[in-house]
Image (cartoon, grey):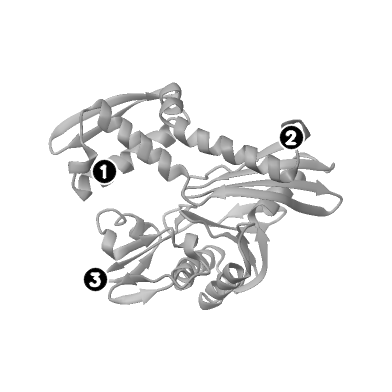
Amino acid sequence: MAIIGIDLGTTNSLAAYWDKGDVKLITDENGEVLFPSVVGYIEAEGLVAGRPAKERLLTHSKDTVSSFKRFMGTDKKYSLGGTDYTPLELSAMVLERIKRNAEFLLKEEIEEAIITVPAYFNDKQRSDTKNSAKIAGLTVKRLINEPSAAALAYRMKHSKDDLTLIVFDFGGGTLDLSYVECFKNIIEIVAVAGDNYLGGDDIDRLIAEYFCRENQLNLETMNVQQYAAILKCAEASKQQLENENEIDITLNIDGTDYSTLLNDDILFEICMPLFAKIKNLFLHILNDAGSKVSNIDGLCLAKQIK
């Protein structure tokens, strides 16, 4: 019986399994590997998790919730379809759907999982993560700190020597920095820093604001559907820029075509407020570790998989 590994993320989740000496990602029915950590209520269908919920995140915001991982370990309530749900219960819905995706792909029942959690998660948050998995029908064989998992993978691929790493996990909704020391068979997290309200979603928002400024559009007077369209276009433009030097962001709003140029230099400029926050966190983690840049052997960057 297969054991799957799950990255239960704030914005997106991911699952994988070990096959013939290699790691393979688990896909959904559409061949997608990223599973949006979003749960919504559709009157004709009931509760849905993943991409169908994400598509309604902005257009049906009262019936859709996301980023609930930020409140794991608390009694915060989210109302969907007239019923209140905790972050634990919402996470269970995401995990249950991931479990079903894995069973469909592997053609066998999945009962066990290894789940990664942020290094700063306390005992209550870790316990709630395990209970979420239990509700989803999964037994957690082990919880692994996310930076520890990243450092292990980095070391297996690049070097068996003693290493000092900075694990830089810039997710969709959160940023986590970890100062990690690897020696012998030990992975030690020396210091952590992060921001639960800083991530790729903020880059999408800044691109959307830039697009509106360039086209004399007022975000504050837009309806929900228009704002959702601009944000979706911003996210797609950000991803497209990974493979091209510059692009034209184009969008039709109420019959009028709008466009503007976006390249790396422009993106760097509009994201400077984010970079300033990241720099401060980096300096903070070095101070907490009692270290300096020259002591770092490598930088492990978490890259979003599309």
The reply, left or right, for residue 5 in relation to residue 80 is right
Numbered circle sitting on residue 43: 3
Mark closer to the chain start, 2 or 1 = 1
Mark closer to the chain start, 3 or 2 = 3
| Nearer to the camera, 41 or 204 | 204
For the residues marked 3 and 2, what is the alpha-carbon distance in whole angstroms? Answer: 55 Å
* Residue receiving disc 2: 292
Q: Amino acid at mark 2?
A: Lys
Q: Amino acid at mark 3?
A: Glu
| Nearer to the camera, 142 or 278 | 278
Could you say where residue 113 lies in the image, as x and y percent from the top left?
Answer: 62, 68
For the residues marked 3 and 1, what is the alpha-carbon distance in whole angstroms? Answer: 23 Å
Which is more foreground, mark 2 or mark 1? 2
State which quarter of the image contains the N terminus.
Answer: bottom right
| Nearer to the camera, 217 or 292 | 292
Numbered circle sitting on residue 229: 1
- Residue at the image point whose x is 36% and y is 34% from the top: 207
Mark 2 crowd level (few <14, some 14–19, many ≥20, 10 Å Cα) = few
